[in-house]
Amino acid sequence: MITITDKAKEKLLDLRQKENRDEHYFVRVGVAGGGCSGLSYELNFDKELKADDKVFEDKGLKIVCDKKSFLYLIGTQLEFSDGLNGKGFVFNNPNATRTCGCGESFAV
């Protein structure tokens, strides 16, 4: 399962509204090759489900992930960090054995 914190939920709902996307849009998380550690996180809004998608709901928000990415993201919690040292959205991934300094890429 992939979960989100309350603060991440608030920020995602705010962004969805600012981008004029209605409640039919869900949060899509994924993994792509690249970044300094080998794999990069992806996060965007989508409204098209694919055949191999895994669908979750946490705190009333629908979260979707493709099957391949899910293998890397099992147990991940998405949070949002702001403030002086804030990084924006942060993936707390228990499967990552190494992450880069910016937190946008990882290795397993």
Image: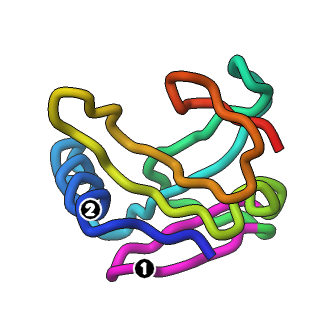
Q: What's the magenta bit mostly, secondary-structure-wise?
A: strand
Q: Tell me the quarter of the image containing the N terminus.
A: bottom right
**104 horizontally vs 62: left or right:** right
Residue 72, percent from left and from top: 77, 55
Residue 86, percent from left and from top: 27, 33
Residue 8, percent from left and from top: 31, 57
Does 54 appear in magenta?
Answer: yes
**59 horizontally vs 92: left or right:** left
- Mark 1 and mark 2 lie on one chain; the one further toward the N terminus is 2
Does 61 appear in magenta?
Answer: yes
Query: What number of labels is visible?
Result: 2
Please report the residue visible at 74 percent of the width from the left and 56 percent of the height from the top.
95
**101 horizontally vs 26: left or right:** right
Q: Is residue 44 above or below residue 49?
A: above
Identity of the residue furthest to the top in this view = 36
Q: Is residue 106 above or below residue 2?
A: above
Along the viewing direction, whichever of 7 and 30 lies nearer the viewer: 7
**28 horizontally vs 45: left or right:** right
Q: Amino acid at mark 2?
A: Asp
Give the magenta part as a residue range: 53-66
Residue 63, percent from left and from top: 50, 68
Q: Which residue is mark 1?
A: 58
Q: Dividing the picture into quarters, in which one does residue 2 lie?
A: bottom right
Crowd band around label 1 with a 10 angstrom C-alpha radius: few (<14), some (14–19), many (20+): some
Mark seen at residue 22? 2
Q: Dividing the picture into quarters, in which one does residue 84 lie?
A: top left
**What separation in Å lies between label 1 and label 2 (alpha carbons)?**
18 Å
Helix, strand or loop for disc 2: loop
Q: Is residue 12 above or below residue 64?
A: above
Q: Tell me the quarter of the image containing the C terminus.
A: top right
Please report the residue visible at 53 percent of the width from the left and 32 percent of the height from the top.
103
Q: Dividing the picture into quarters, in which one does residue 99 lie?
A: top right
